[in-house]
């Protein structure tokens, strides 16, 4: 479990670092300055001429807070919220109470990853729920096709049709790499564990958490 | 408002696909991504120019009430200003008012309360919060399992006579806390921000030291600034207390806590009844817009009616909704102009909270293209 969660967090960070689009996906538009620094505070007037007509557009992102993240995970995996109530109650005090991106801490990301692992554990071990996300087939079959797995998971969780194509492609490459690593030396019987880990990594990633 | 929608839609069509806008709209208003068929439908609506219809559809979801509205208003119902607290009667009532498109100001004085209507639930009790916690823990629906009822008790004044508000604001203390909460939650002002030493201190109670630490200037420059306006308003809640785990109303009998420490400054104002007065209609707080025809009254219900007319209330609500939907504070000239238009529409159209969300979303999502 620890390893899975670590990988989930790593993927989250990797995606954020590797993809400039992640900082400014089409559904957000956070200002990215020329030097790459983000700013949350709106800049009201173009400094070059001070004209209100030239005001810069300002965009903001939010980080899903406690109930938003829980309900989002439930909606995306098909796992009823009430069936994981105990896990949620245990983790809720560690999840973010605000949607302010700047207030997100590693501990909050960690708690979110743990919650994602719970949802994915339930979803991937349930034939019907897994089929809803990945299509029919045994876990080993899905793991044997990492490209297809990455595509299905991102299609299911990321709202890829409204995400930047380059970002999605890069993200999928990371997921393929992760799947391949996790599956190395594993017997078919352990394939479902690989699915849980990869699912949790995708579910706990920034395209889901940031809105 | 119609013009605002027009420009917002023009911007949407010019700059973003209806599908992207629909995706964002659902995320921002419901707090969760839309299911596929919903996304298709919302995109169609937005594509055909019916942004408000799309927003209304999102606001008809369980998640809008259970996540967005609940997280927003739960902060108002506890003294820690935290969103992650169990459901209570005050929050359920506000959720119901939003769901039913009632005039939001009803929460300040109408004798209404919302509760679960599902058989098997423990009935609401003035002594505990079990009913509402059960409602939440059983995953009941705010759309179908929540119904309006008449508040019970000798006194009714909207949320001010709910158990949750009483627990947060009348428990111990000196009943000044309700004013602090009202200023913070409904006028977006901390007490520090309304400090005005220019107003007379005639109504400041006896428990406030006039020379704290032997220094009168501290009182004159700090303490007086808040107490001069807060103390006469807080008298609206004079007959209310929270003891033995429930709201207690004692008509005609001012609880001892209201006149605590009379020896501190015996010449100060004594609380003898629940007659309240507003003096912040003048001075630096005049822009808050207290209604000059309702500056005095008795009890929380009349106070609530007065509060319903305060100009700062719709401004504050519009600002809070802006921060939820747009995920930032309104600061730019464009933001502030839009905020004012949205506020104006909210007031003109009868204080319907869903309209406030829809108009704000139209502005922010148009902007985000």
Image (spheres, rainbow, N blue to C red):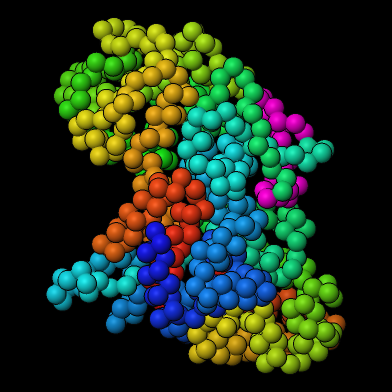
Q: Given the current orientation, which residue lies at the most extreme left position?
A: A49
Q: Examine the rendering and report whether any part of residue B364 can be seen.
A: no
Q: Over which residues does the magenta segment extend? A: B122-143
Above or below for B116 versus A190: above
Residue B9: x, y in percent? 43, 72
Q: Where is the N terminus of chain B found, in terms of image quarters?
A: bottom left
**Magenta residue check for A193:** no
Residue B192: x, y in percent? 29, 37
Q: Is residue A203 left or right of residue B307?
A: right
Above or below for A197 versus B210: below
Quarter of the rendering containing residue A6: bottom right
Name the dominant secondary structure of the magenta segment: loop
Q: Examine the rendering and report whether any part of residue B176 can be seen.
A: yes
Quarter of the rendering containing residue B236: top left
**Magenta residue check for B139:** yes
For image coordinates 30% across by 81% down, the residue present is A35
Residue B70: x, y in percent? 57, 48
Q: Nearer the viewer, residue B240 or B115?
A: B115
Residue A41: x, y in percent? 32, 64
For image coordinates 82% across by 38% down, the residue present is B120
Q: Nearer the viewer, residue B107 or B171?
A: B107
For image coordinates 75% across by 39% down, the residue present is B117
For image coordinates 72% across by 67% down, the residue present is A119
Q: Where is the C terminus of chain B found, in terms of image quarters?
A: bottom left
């Amino acid at each position: 479990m620890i390893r899975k969660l670590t990988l989930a967090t790593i993927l989250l960070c990797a995606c954020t670092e590797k993809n400039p689009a992640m900082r400014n996906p089409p559904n957000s538009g956070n200002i990215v300055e020329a030097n790459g620094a983000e700013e949350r505070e709106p800049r009201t007037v173009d400094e070059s001429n001070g004209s209100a007509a030239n005001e810069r557009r300002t965009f903001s992102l939010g980080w899903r807070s406690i109930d938003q993240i829980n309900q989002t995970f439930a909606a995306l995996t098909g796992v009823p919220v009430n069936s994981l109530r105990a896990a949620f109650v245990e983790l809720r005090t560690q999840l973010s109470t605000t949607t302010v991106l700047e207030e997100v801490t590693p501990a909050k990301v960690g708690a979110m990853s743990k919650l994602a692992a719970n949802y994915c554990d339930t979803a991937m071990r349930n034939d019907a729920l897994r089929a809803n996300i990945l299509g029919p087939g045994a876990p080993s079959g899905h793991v044997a096709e990492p490209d297809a797995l990455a595509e299905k998971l991102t299609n299911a969780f990321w709202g890829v049709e409204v995400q930047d194509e380059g970002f999605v492609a890069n993200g999928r490459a990371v997921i393929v790499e992760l799947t391949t690593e996790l599956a190395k030396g594993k017997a078919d019987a352990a394939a479902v564990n690989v699915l849980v880990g990869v699912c949790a990594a995708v579910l706990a990633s920034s395209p889901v958490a940031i809105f | 408002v119609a013009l605002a929608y027009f420009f917002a839609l023009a911007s949407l069509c010019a700059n973003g696909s209806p599908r992207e806008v629909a995706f964002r709209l659902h995320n921002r208003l419901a707090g969760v991504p839309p299911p596929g068929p919903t996304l298709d439908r919302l995109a169609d609506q937005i594509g055909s120019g019916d942004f408000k219809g799309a927003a209304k559809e999102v606001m008809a979801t369980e998640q809008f009430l259970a996540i967005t509205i609940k997280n927003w208003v739960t902060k108002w119902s506890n003294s820690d200003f935290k969103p992650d607290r169990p459901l209570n009667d005050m929050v359920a009532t506000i959720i119901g008012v939003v769901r039913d498109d009632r005039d939001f100001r009803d929460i300040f004085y109408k004798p209404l309360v919302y509760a679960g209507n599902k058989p098997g639930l423990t009935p609401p009790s003035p002594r505990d919060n079990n009913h509402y916690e059960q409602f939440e823990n059983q995953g009941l629906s705010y759309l179908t399992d929540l119904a309006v009822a008449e508040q019970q008790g000798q006194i009714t004044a909207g949320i001010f006579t709910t158990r949750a508000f009483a627990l947060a604001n009348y428990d111990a203390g000196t009943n000044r806390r309700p004013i602090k909460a009202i200023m913070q939650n409904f006028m977006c002002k901390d007490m520090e921000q309304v400090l005005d030493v220019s107003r007379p201190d005639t109504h400041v109670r006896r428990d406030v030291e006039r020379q704290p630490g032997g220094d009168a200037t501290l009182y004159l420059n700090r303490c007086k600034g808040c107490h001069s306006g807060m103390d006469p308003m807080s008298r609206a809640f004079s007959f209310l207390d929270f003891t033995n785990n429930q709201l207690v109303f004692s008509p005609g009998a001012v609880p001892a806590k209201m006149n605590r420490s009379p020896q501190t400054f015996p010449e100060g104002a004594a609380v003898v009844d629940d007659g309240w007065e507003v003096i912040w209609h003048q001075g630096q707080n005049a822009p808050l817009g207290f209604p000059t025809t309702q500056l005095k009254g008795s009890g929380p219900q009349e106070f609530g009616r007065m509060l319903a007319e305060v100009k700062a209330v719709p401004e504050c609500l519009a600002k809070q909704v802006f921060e939820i939907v747009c995920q930032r504070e309104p600061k730019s000239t464009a933001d502030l102009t839009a905020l004012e238009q949205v506020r104006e529409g909210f007031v003109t159209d009868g204080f319907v909270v869903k309209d406030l969300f829809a108009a704000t979303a139209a502005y922010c999502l148009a902007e985000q293209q």
